[in-house]
């Protein structure tokens, strides 16, 4: 067996890479919180507008997921110096946001009048 030397800056796995990206970017650029808020607000307004234009409650289906994302965003803002809570709440935020965005596309396909 040959001994390998591990340098401190090497990424040890996918978990380490995700932690470095999330923690590094979020801690270095505090304006990301405002960007997250704008994205969440735009998607919520699109859902509300879709319900108004379609006169159907189906475009409102993703709103509970956006509420979960908003809660995760509040918790994300309140995270102190710990890396683990930052990773958890970032995962909840982006997971809820992506599933809600996917549900928006599903509802658009369901409500498509052309049927394609």
Image (cartoon, rainbow, N blue to C red):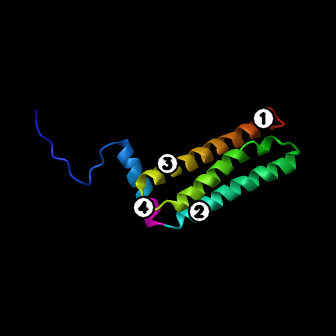
Per the image, is 55 magenta? no
Tell which tag, 1 or 4, sits nearer the viewer.
Answer: 4
Mark closer to the chain start, 3 or 2: 2
Mark closer to the chain start, 1 or 4: 4
Distance in Å between CA atoms under marks 3 and 2: 19 Å
**Residue 22, percent from left and from top:** 44, 54
According to the picture, the residue beneath numbered tag 1 turns out to be 110
* Quarter of the N terminus within the rendering: top left
According to the picture, the residue beneath numbered tag 3 turns out to be 88
Residue found at the very far right of the displayed protein: 55
Tell which tag, 3 or 2, sits nearer the viewer.
Answer: 3
The kind of secondary structure element at disc 4 is: loop
Q: Which span is picked out in magenta?
A: 25-29
Residue shown at the point (30%, 48%) measured from the top left:
11
Mark closer to the chain start, 1 or 2: 2
On the image, which quarter does residue 99 sit in? top right
**Residue 96, percent from left and from top:** 61, 45
**Residue 71, percent from left and from top:** 62, 53
**Residue 15, percent from left and from top:** 38, 44
According to the picture, the residue beneath numbered tag 4 turns out to be 81
* Quarter of the C terminus within the rendering: top right
Depicted 109 relative to depicted 42: above or below: above
Per the image, is 27 magenta? yes
């Amino acid at each position: 067996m040959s001994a390998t030397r591990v340098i401190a800056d090497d990424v040890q796995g996918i978990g380490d890479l995700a932690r470095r990206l999330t923690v590094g970017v979020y801690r270095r650029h505090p304006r990301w919180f405002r960007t997250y808020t704008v994205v969440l607000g735009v998607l919520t307004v699109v859902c509300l507008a879709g319900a108004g234009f379609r006169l159907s409650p189906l475009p409102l289906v993703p709103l509970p997921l956006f509420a979960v994302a908003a809660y995760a965003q509040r918790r994300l803002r309140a995270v102190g110096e710990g890396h683990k809570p930052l990773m958890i709440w970032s995962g909840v935020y982006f997971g809820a946001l992506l599933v809600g965005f996917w549900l928006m596309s599903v509802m658009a396909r369901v409500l498509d009048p052309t049927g394609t």
